[in-house]
Image (tube, helix red, strand yellow):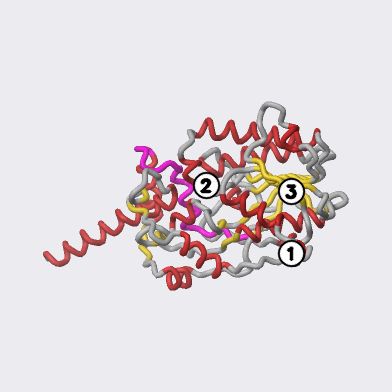
Amino acid sequence: MVAGRGRAPVRSGPDVVVVVVGRGAVPAAIGAWFSRPAHRGGPAWAVRHTEEVPAVAPRDSLAGADVVVLVQHDADFTAYQGTPKAERRADGVAHAQRVLAAARSVGVRHVVVISSAMVHGAAPGRSVITDDAALIATDEGLVGDLLAVEAVVARARRRHTPLVTVLRPAALVGQGVDTMITRHFEAPRLLTVRGAVRDWQFAHVDDVASAAEHAILHGLAGALTVGSNDVLSPSQVEAVSGLRRIELAAVTAFGTAERLHRVGVLPAPSSELAYTVYSWTVASDRLRASGWEPHWTSAACLEVLLEGGTGRLAVAGRRVGTRDAAALGAAGAAVAFLGTAAVWRRARGRRRG
């Protein structure tokens, strides 16, 4: 899905209707962005919000809309891990199909889908992700869900209308955002893989919203990566977070995560541990070439992330005091927990010697 210039862009105005579709913190933040007063420097939009386009009379939810923003990556990990994979996948695909079909039938001019740069994968030494980077091939976990929906979106793009844009942000940050990455920072230690340097880049939900608005106003179609301008080194992240790292061999980290997933401690597959230990920074190349700039730095995003996790602790796969498994944050916590135990055992052995 290659990004580029689309047809005539939608111009803002109080009579231009934007419908934000989705549940949770991310669609709420996007709706708030489009609803901000025009006198504060932003254009004017008429904004509506619906949690879901229903199977019965789906057109009614989007009637009168000029623009639809479908939030597929809603950053609600509690809801994600509480739904069986087959049901989650089928519901996500069917809902995307309904939204796109209803949008076309009521004459929507532009659809923006919020996905994630996770669909490009994370791996040791991977290069910065550009808009036209290849997608990974997986059927597992959240990434498999997003790829299934993006396949639906790719087919919709072959039609003449509406114009379709997919935004693929870096690790999301913002009030109420709950993801495998935010939970990673609730662990007692930051898991690292021996020999890998994990750079950190974030995308604040306000910048994702501004990127959506920019794409609409400039008629940008296709896939666009979204992220802050700066990238943080592991030492910078440790200094700001105050968390110490624990370093394990990759085979130990991923093997432990796989065992925990297999026995039901972790809802996410071990392959998604990669997103916490390997880099997946993005270029935002075509957005920046068209004049968009993020407001938030990765350093400021990290502060927001840490503040949001204050008082929470994920240990050995679960948040203390809740029934929520912490997914990859939990995988990191669990592996770090086991790794710490191994360090203690070695230390006791040396003392006995």
Q: Is residue 83 above or below residue 15?
A: above
> Residue 150 location, x and y as percent?
66, 41
Q: What crowding class fits label 1: few (fewer than 14 Cα within 10 Å), some (14-19), or many (20 or more)?
A: some
* Left or right: 349 in relation to 70: left
Q: How many marks?
A: 3
Magenta stretch: includes residue 281: yes
Give me the disc on residue 76.
2
The image quarter containing residue 104 is top right
Q: Earlier in the sequence, mark 2 or mark 3?
A: 2
* Left or right: 268 in relation to 229: left
Q: Is residue 116 above or below residue 86?
A: below
Q: What crowding class fits label 2: few (fewer than 14 Cα within 10 Å), some (14-19), or many (20 or more)?
A: some
Q: Is residue 137 above or below residue 90?
A: below
Tell me the amino acid under the disc marked 2: Asp
- Quadrant location of the C terminus in the rendered image: bottom left
What residue is disc 1 on? 292
- Secondary structure under badge 3? strand
Q: Residue at x 36, y 43 (%)?
A: 260
Disc nearest the viewer among 2 and 3: 2
Viewer can see residue 289: no
Q: Earlier in the sequence, mark 1 or mark 2?
A: 2
Tell me the amino acid under the disc marked 3: Thr
Q: Residue at x 63, y 48 (%)?
A: 115
Viewer can see residue 309: yes
Marks 1 and 3 sit apart, C-alpha to C-alpha, by 15 Å
What residue is disc 3 on? 165
